[in-house]
Image (spheres, rainbow, N blue to C red):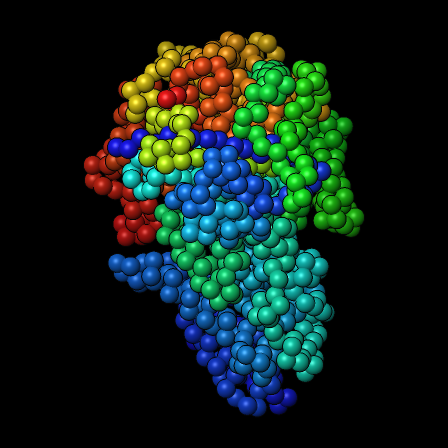
Amino acid sequence: MTDAYIYDSVRSPRGKGKTDGTLNEVSAVRLSALALNELKERNNLDGHAVEDVIWGNVTQVGEQGACLARSAVLYSDLDESIPGVSVNRFCSSALEAVNMAAGQVRGGMGDGYIAGGVESMSRVPMGSDGGAIATDPTLAMKTYFVPQGISADIIATKYGFSRDECDALAVESQKRAARAQSEGRFDRSVFVVRDQNGLTILDRDELIRENTTMQTLGALRPSFKDMGEVMPGFDTVALMKYPEMEAVNHVHHAGNSSGLADGAAAILVGNKEFGERYGLKPRAKFRHMSKIGTDPTIMLTGPVTVTEKILKETGMSFSDIDLMEVNEAFASVVLRFMTHFDADPDKVNVNGGAIAMGHPLGATGAVILGTLLDEMERADKEVGLTTLCIGSGMGVATIIERV
Amino acid sequence: MAEFNYKLDDDGIATITWDVPGKSMNVLSFDALKELDAHVDTALGDDSVKGVIITSGKKDFAGGMDLNALAKLREDAGDNPAKGIFDGIMQMHGVLRKIELAGMDRKTKKGGKPIVAALPGTAAGIGFELPLACHHIIVADNPKAKIGLPEILVGLFPGGGGATRVSRKIGLMAAAPILMEGRMQTPAKMKAMGLIDEVVAADQLISAAKDWINGAKDADLVKPWDEKKYRYPGGAPYTASGLPMFVGASVMIHGKTQGVYPAAKALLGAIYEGALVPFDTALKVEARWFTKVMMTPSTTGMIRSLFLNKQALEKGAVRPKDIPDQTVKKVGILGAGMMGAGIAYVSALAGIEVVLIDASQEAADRGKAHSATILDGGIKRKKVTEEKKAAVLARITASSDYATLTGCDLIVEAVFEDPEIKAAVTKQTEAVIPEDCIFASNTSTLPISSLATASKRPEQFIGIHFFSPVHKMNLVEIIKGAQTGPRAVAKAMDYVRQIRKTPIVVNDARFFYANRCIIPYINEGMRMIHEGIEPALIENAAKLFGMPLGPLQLTDETSIDLGVKIAKATKAAMGNEYQNDEADEIAFKLFDQGRYGRKTNGGFYTYNEAGKRTGLWQGLRDNWPPMAEQPPLEDVKSRLMLAQSLEAVRALEEGVLEDIREGDVGAILGWGFAPWSGGPFSSLDLMGAANAVATCDRLAETYGERFAAPALLREMAEKGQSFYGRFGPDAKEAA
């Protein structure tokens, strides 16, 4: 088997994913092209250097529709001979894109790929692509469909995570993100989003709230209580699936869940020859990639299941992992991961996560893989794992090691 | 003989009159559908016909589909029953669609003949789906008329185009009470909802129909869904306004039905999938889902119990045949407490003269005031008029004087559950009532045969057991004592029919039928707490089996003090054979702490000041800590189900029950036994006797002998029999 390497990683800063967010004025296709161009320029690639652009994106309608990946290639400085494919595995789309690229390199289908993703949540609202899972009664009832926020609250209820524990994790995420930003730990990956005249639009993650405390979070109302208990009453469905529970404890709110965000991220993946061709030094090697389907109702327990799977497949033990990025979709997701593996908090999301900086759905997988790689280099760690929980009950994980 | 008659008037208007010979209410069969089809062909093919009226020769339009005809579709299709049902339903769609398009050119939408439905009264099920396919619906201003699609209540859904036409006409949200709750409405309400077009005086029904035909233009005949610009009212599934409604509908239906009613799921599936395709395709989709419901085994049980057998019992299927009519004219009710007052109300409501007796005039008056309270509630909801209230109250004479019982032809005794008090009032009453008067006791715990010893005329002594609250609970248990004669049984049944409730007749035994089955259910719930099963799991498992209330909530509603008193009495009566210590431990502990249930604002649940349940009492988990490893849901469900249904089997074995139809209908109406299943016997048939016995064996080994399979069930498993195969009415006739 051919080894696959990461040669570089770039990402845009994450903008607030609402109409008053700074990146709201930047289209998804342009944001994508900026990331592709950044990677091309930084690494002095030819326009035809890669085999394909595999591009994660969740809400594939409107400007994100009609194979955004191909549009992004055509919008960018890459040659038209590079095709482009959009992939959707919800929140892990970009990590899935990277894994697909690595798998294709390993399998001999080309020497180099750009993989990553984009989501402009301020321009293409989450859920605007409809979907049978929630809407088709036959499927929704078969899977006991509840929205992700309810699933996160079910995790908290089932595993006994209190509101305070969730809030404490959120405060810590903010603190770590603020420190990482002020110390310049994201600088290697983050590029400045500029307009067509070269003027700066956004140069840093804009969602971080350094002053977050238990008190400020304590004032927030639970986000999913009404839809759970009143209209349309998702909790009843949840209790049908988990009848050992008497009620769902609604602990999640805007402050301990990931924020809506706009952003793009791209990772350059290739084999040894690819690096030699462009005079690039590999930054990390793919050890293994794995994915799995899990209970769709509680939905967000995939990181635990897929991590167990990837450890088994690689013959590794949890203690072999030096550093981890577990996407902070909701506080309970990370708490579940940490308690299950009895993880050392100093190894998990050490530079904060999506609770502090936002979660541009189709880009996050590549964002946090880049963050992991940067931190592995900064802290001189050897082995890192990235994993995300995923809509409809899935999990994806990637283990990389420094070369 | 023809069921639809065709007549063409000189004015060029043809009238198709539905009039099934020998029946008071029209129901549709597939043969009749062919007649209708032929008449429609005649009208459309005859140039001298300019319009058609479809009406009824009876006081109502139609009651619905002949459910036996649906069953026959399945049987006639041999080894491919699904195809038989599907083809039959599609044939029905074909006829209705022919009416709807009425010969018009499908491109220009011109040249159709106006077809009007003129409904003199009630129209239900296909009786409303047929009008929905017409171009205009006129209903007579008949105060008794109810219009709607009640199929969901018997385990089906409106599969004659009703699901598709109603949802497309008024949208998913507006259609919900009609389609998903099966609520029948007055003509005025249906007009307000946009489901019928006109309400006119009864004598103007036909002239109004003719007027409409004479004024109808081509555009009036085109249904919204046949127009290019059609938009789904409220929004189709994948629109900004429609999406949350469709997502919400699944959640609400799923939660409300706890996933056990296949018809509710299929209905929503048909509406959703139908909303995404053209109308004719939607009808086909609807037919596929309807077929799926018909092919689901539990549907058969649900229709059988909730429709066919309930009706049969109400019509006196088990009434002694050769006893003349025993209609009650004047009933005397002894005891004006909660039960007596309720019995007085339902009797007076049914037009029976009532004497309500209690020890003091004040107590009797209080009992009568109960009726006024209920009627006032009805007035508030605009269901009752002041005149009606006055008429009902005028029928009730409240008194403390036994002499007022003179002339009663039925007595219902509802005094304290104390044999001595009951004996005393029996004697006191028999001193003044006519010799042929029937005496009934509303006891729920005392054997009728022993109460009858106080009577001079034990053959005229019987049990009539009402459930609380009397005006809401539709089951009445009639209990035959050892000496009760057939006239007493007939009297009790005719009385129950008068008050429009459903009777079951059982033989005298401890707790009769209903309570004997409920008690093991409640006890099983308490044993589970003792074992360390999560209280929430117990309650949720019961609901997931389709029980309206979990055993703990049911106990709270009925109060634990009663249970504890019964347990103590049972213990005294049974001595050493009594085995209930684990359940007792729980009940006694709550009793000792004054947690009687809802009435003390604390029981298995906690309640707020307004009396609203706020959650399970934490003391349960403190006193009986839940096990770390909880049993599988299916085990908990099986135990709660079998605790009831095995008791029903034992009641049949012991001859307390004489007819399994009564066992099934009584269980559903009496204590809400999983209606989707058709009742305890139907649910065991669904499991299959062999499977049920295997489950019993497994549960008996783990949880105790109370789950040991009754000999009858074991024998049926060996012989490969089912309850309805062996004890059903057909088997009885054959035997």
Give left or right: position of B46 versus A97. Answer: right
B599 or A402, nearer to the observer? A402
B348 or B681, nearer to the observer? B681
Q: How many marks?
A: 0
**Can residue B39 be seen by looking at this rendering?**
yes
The structure residue drawn at horizontal position 37% and vertical position 11%, both measured from the top left corner, is B576
Image x and y of residue B467, in percent: 56, 34
Could you say which quadrant of the image residue B699 lies in? top left
Depicted A87 relative to depicted A399: above or below: below
Quarter of the image with the C terminus of chain A in it:
top left
Depicted B28 relative to depicted A47: above or below: below
Image x and y of residue B367, in percent: 71, 32
Image x and y of residue A224, in percent: 61, 31
Quarter of the image with the N terminus of chain A in it:
top left
The structure residue drawn at horizontal position 57% and vertical position 30%, both measured from the top left corner, is A190
The structure residue drawn at horizontal position 50% and vertical position 79%, both measured from the top left corner, is B40
The structure residue drawn at horizontal position 47% and vertical position 37%, both measured from the top left corner, is A44
A219 or A145, nearer to the observer? A219
Image x and y of residue B254, in percent: 51, 41
Depicted A247 relative to depicted B93: above or below: above
- Residue extending farthest to the right is B386
**Can residue B175 be seen by looking at this rendering?**
no
